[in-house]
Amino acid sequence: MRWVVTGGLGFIGSNFIRIALRERPDLEIVNLDAMTYAGNPANLRDIEPARRYRFVHGDIADPAAVREALGDGADAIVNFAAETHVDRSILDPEAFLKTDILGTHVLLEAVREQKIARFLQVSTDEVYGHVAEGESKEDDNLRPRSPYSASKAGGDLQVLAYHTTFGTPVIITRGSNTYGPYQYPEKLIPLFITNLIDDQTVPVYGDGMQIRDWLHVEDHAHGIMHVLEQGELGEIYNIGGGNGRTNLEITEKLMHGCGRDIKTHVRHVADREGHDRRYAIDTAKARALGWKPRVAFESGLPATIQWYRENEAWWRPLKSGEFGEYYKRQYAHR
Ligand code: DAU
């Protein structure tokens, strides 16, 4: 069995590769990754070099790189490769169109040409847009509201169109906000933990009452693997943790876990433009397939804080260099 995983040096992709190699002894994985700012070889330092793992440096929007990764074939492609950060999509939307839409298209063409048996598109609950109440179901209308989520929705629509038009064997997963080890420190949880470890303030957008549903990365990786192996072609599966929390609740927990005081360590800053207030997804369909999240948020969050405490050598280099420039651009004026 050989799977080509794209974006496998990123946060969810690297956790997926580690788990899949551990739990599927006959599996070989080829990892195609462009090594952008978020694609970090250190995310897989513990498994490389491995007999059942091959790395190809390249972009999913480049057909030659995709051909090289596919070599003489694969049983499945799992597409994690994406530009993923909403704030960056507000600063610079174009990169999102290229990777999330054009890159997906190039992969779909390769699936057709090489008759790959399964293509799994890793997507996001953000494509449903802000949900005032209730939970988004897989067949709800898409109402993406940021350049990031609009690009992901564009990718999803291409995937579904290929299924309808060409019979391409596709599946889509839509995950909720994911947290855990190896997450690039631009995202809420790792940014706040690493700032607090360094005794810095954390920037809370607007009133902090926005709601996200938190999912541990191992649960997300297991969900994707489960759907890849058991899901029905042409179907979409929501994968969420069922842990809806306001950003202020998360901030309080992180303050507590890092031994800091909310009064001195929160900086209220201008809200994100077009900020979605709430996401919530119905995960009954993935659960009916036999998947469910296993990591309780009450233990997963403290364990994540502990991981960042113990792995400063992993995140400190990331917070210098490119990140410093980005942080200034993103936060200095707010
Ligand atoms: O819902 C799934 C999505 O979750 C994924 O598709 C995205 O790739 C991922 O980035 C994430 O999107 P969010 O925009 O929800 O994640 P982020 O960590 O950027 O922000 C989480 C919440 O925290 C959001 O309401 C904005 C807020 N926030 C974020 C940052 C970085 C702050 O208040 N301050 C911050 O500095």
Image (cartoon, grey):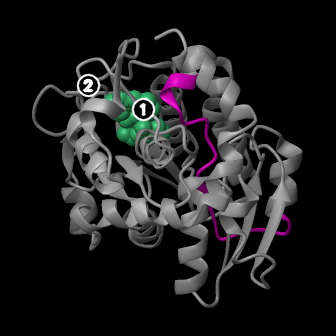
Q: Earlier in the sequence, mark 1 or mark 2?
A: 2
The circle on residue 130 is 2
Task: Reply above or below: 119 against 199.
Answer: below
- Residue 126 visible within the image: no
Q: Is 85 colored magenta in this rendering?
A: yes
Residue drawn at 46 percent across, 42 percent down: 199
Task: Reply above or below: 101 against 331.
Answer: below
Query: For the residue labelled by badge 2, is the local secondary structure a helix, a strand or a loop?
Result: loop
Residue drawn at 76 percent across, 37 percent down: 61
Q: Which residue is mark 1?
A: 201
The image quadrant of residue 209 is top left
Image quadrant occupied by the N terminus: bottom right
Task: Reply above or below: 115 against 101.
Answer: below
Q: Is 144 colored magenta in this rendering?
A: no
193 sits left or right of 260 in the view: right
Q: Is mark 2 within 8 Å of ligand 1?
A: no
Specify the segment rendered in magenta: 71-88
**At label 2, which amino acid type do we have?**
His
| Ligand 1 image position (quadrant) | top left
